[in-house]
Image (cartoon, rainbow, N blue to C red):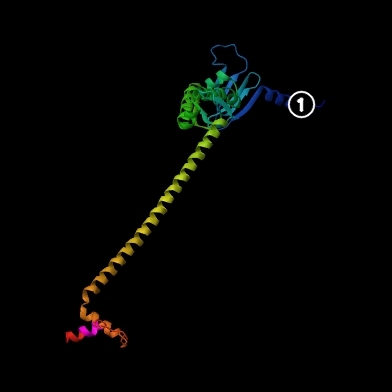
């Protein structure tokens, strides 16, 4: 083997040795790394944690390792869970939690759970969310839960916040999609339908009353107009009657006479002419 080959092989061997013994890792911004020993009998070490690290980190891969935790807000939506109300009604709830890790407690989180964050989300966090719903649901009947959904969710969040903050998880947002049991949902639909029918009937009654009032107003107006017209005609007739005297009546009677005398007469056959004659 030539000296050149020996140098090349030695360099490759040293490179591989350095790669296995000394590891390099980059901890991105918004994350915190936990550098810990894989094997340690030193009880003074906090769960074998050497230190928290950021940026470029060189460490011995044989005896140490790094867990990286994000310190920005995380959002997790869980599959629907079943929760019993006080009266044994079963609700389906789909919770979503937005949270972040308390930077001052990241080491404690690692020491206690020694798992990466996705594993903690499906383990401890899921249990905490489920327990918060389960315990709060037992405080409400089905009807009171549906009537006070805001209060229910507020109590769930308060219980969850109290539990998680002690462990180093800060709750930023919390929402839930609540589905009532089918029997209650049908009852709610029936009640809403009855309310809609009642409102429709009430509106129809009000519309009929309005139409009746309009018709009555029209009838009253027509009756009033007839009364006014009748009164005017009566007043006119009264005025005409008051203006007529016996001479005027006789004058109009003669004016309308055609001059033909009846063939059978008596002393009273021509009262108008007779009277006119006497008046002269």
How many numbered circles does the render carry?
1
Residue 61 image point, x, y percent = 65, 22
Residue 145 image point, x, y percent = 48, 29
Toward which corner of the image does residue 116 lie, by quadrant?
top right
Quadrant into which the N terminus falls: top right
Q: Report which residue position mark 1 lands on.
A: 9
Residue 112 image point, x, y percent = 55, 18
Judged left or right of residue 143, residue 18 is: right
Residue, x 70% and y 23% (percent of image)?
A: 17
The residue stretch that appears in magenta: 270-275
Residue nearer the viewer, 206 or 138? 206
Secondary structure at badge 1 equals helix
Judged left or right of residue 103, residue 38 is: right
Q: Is residue 43 above or below residue 164?
A: above
Residue, x 64% and y 25% (percent of image)?
A: 23
Which secondary structure is most common in the magenta stretch? helix
Residue 273 falls within the magenta-colored stretch: yes
Residue nearer the viewer, 277 or 210? 277
């Amino acid at each position: 083997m030539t000296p050149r080959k020996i140098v090349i092989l030695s360099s490759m061997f040293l490179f591989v040795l350095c790669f296995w013994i000394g590891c390099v890792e980059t901890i991105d911004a918004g994350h915190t790394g936990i550098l810990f020993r894989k094997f340690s009998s030193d009880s003074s070490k906090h769960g074998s944690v050497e230190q928290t690290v950021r940026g470029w980190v060189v460490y011995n891969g044989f005896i140490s390792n790094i867990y990286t935790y994000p310190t920005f807000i995380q959002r997790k939506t869980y599959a629907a869970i079943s929760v019993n109300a006080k009266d044994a009604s079963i609700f389906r709830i789909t919770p979503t939690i937005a949270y972040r890790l308390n930077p001052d407690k990241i080491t404690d989180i690692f020491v206690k759970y020694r798992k990466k964050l996705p594993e903690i989300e499906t383990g401890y966090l899921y249990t905490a969310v489920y327990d918060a719903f389960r315990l709060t649901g037992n405080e409400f009947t089905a009807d009171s839960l549906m009537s006070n959904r805001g209060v229910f969710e507020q109590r769930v969040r308060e219980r969850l916040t109290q539990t998680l903050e002690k462990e180093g998880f800060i709750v930023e947002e919390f929402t839930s999609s609540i589905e009532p049991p089918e029997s209650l949902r049908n009852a709610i639909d029936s009640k809403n339908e009855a309310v809609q029918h009642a409102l429709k009937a009430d509106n129809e009654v009000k519309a009929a009353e309005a139409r009746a009032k309009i018709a009555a107003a029209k009838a009253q107006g027509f009756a009033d107009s007839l009364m006014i017209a009748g009164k005017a005609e009566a007043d006119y007739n009264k005025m005409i009657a008051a203006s007529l005297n016996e001479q005027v009546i006789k004058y109009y009677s003669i004016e309308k006479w055609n001059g033909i005398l009846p063939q059978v007469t008596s002393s009273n056959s021509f009262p108008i002419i007779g009277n006119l004659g006497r008046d002269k």
